[in-house]
Amino acid sequence: MAEGTRSVNIKEYIDPVARNLGVDMFYGGKDNVEIGKLEEHEILAVERCFKRGLRLIRKISDEFAEILEQQEPLFLKWAEVAKGQLDNKPIAYPAESGTIGVGWIFPQAVKYTATPSADEPAYTSYKNNTWEIDLSAGTSAYIFGDATHDYRACPTSGQRCFMVIAQNGLVEIGTTPKIRLMRVTTQGASKYAYWPVHPLIEIPVKINKEESMLYIYNTIGMIPVYHNYGIKWEIVPTYSGTSVLPLVGLVFYEYDFIMNKKYIS
């Protein structure tokens, strides 16, 4: 345990706030985690990052921005978990040497290497450097993991990451939505069945333009992704084709993770 952190039951720690906000959580069988206390400047760093992104999202869709804004207090809770996972370093925005950076999740944060392995388990169906996934009707694809491997956020020393996907933070842009079933399991909890997407998935969310091609998938709650705890997120499409499927949430990362430009090839 890093100096200045403490161990908590994560469900007991976060659920009271989540229930008050009407937000669901997925803990994946991970009961106890270390957390670090946020100082005022760290709270401001997370809020500044979140609010800057939210302002731009609101220009595209008021409805989607409202879904995300409701979860802001919970992202601060997860920031405490990020500190506990990453040696209680201070959180900064933008990142500086010796700090934990915070930002909106981007493709290279998910697929951080072109050749996943036991040391860098970035197993996913996403293509390099994009939110694109090639889907085949009736064949499973994976947001995280693959048929035989769990996924973990970057575990490399000095570059470790921790991600939190917002509830309903999987969207499809530009094409009629293809996914009809999803399932999330972890190394500690494989008991969960598939869940179906909501029945109005083919109706796009209202956006602030004449034409809308933004579709929001229902997820089982906010989903944390650790560097030391495996997760698998399976999706089952009923149509074939390439879909753009961004993940919406925050990534916390050690400075060296994107100290230099990150392009996966």
Image: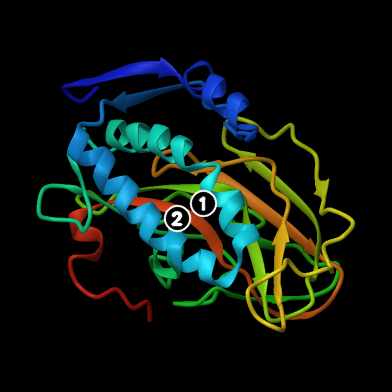
Q: Name the residue type under label 1.
A: Tyr
Question: Which x, y percent locates residue 166?
Answer: 55, 48
Question: Which x, y percent locates residue 158?
Answer: 19, 51
Q: Residue at x 36, y 60 (%)?
A: 52
Question: Which x, y percent locates residue 204?
Answer: 77, 70
> In front: 198, or 64?
64
- Label of residue 151 in the image: 1
Q: Name the residue type under label 2.
A: Pro
- Label of residue 28 in the image: none
Question: Which x, y percent locates residue 97?
Answer: 10, 54
> In front: 76, or 191?
76
Where residue 106 sits, quadrant-wise, is bottom left
Pointer 2: what residue?
121
Disc 2 residue crowd, few under 14, some 14–19, many 20+, Cα 10 Å: many
> In front: 172, or 55?
55
Sooner in the amino-acid sequence: mark 1 or mark 2: 2
- Disc 1 to disc 2, how far (Cα)? 5 Å
Q: Is 173 located above or below residue 21 in the figure? A: below
Q: Residue at x 69, y 35 (%)?
A: 190
Q: Can residue 30 be seen from the camera position used here?
A: yes
Q: Can residue 119 be seen from the camera position used here?
A: no
Where residue 32 sits, quadrant-wise, is top left
Where residue 205 sits, quadrant-wise, is bottom right
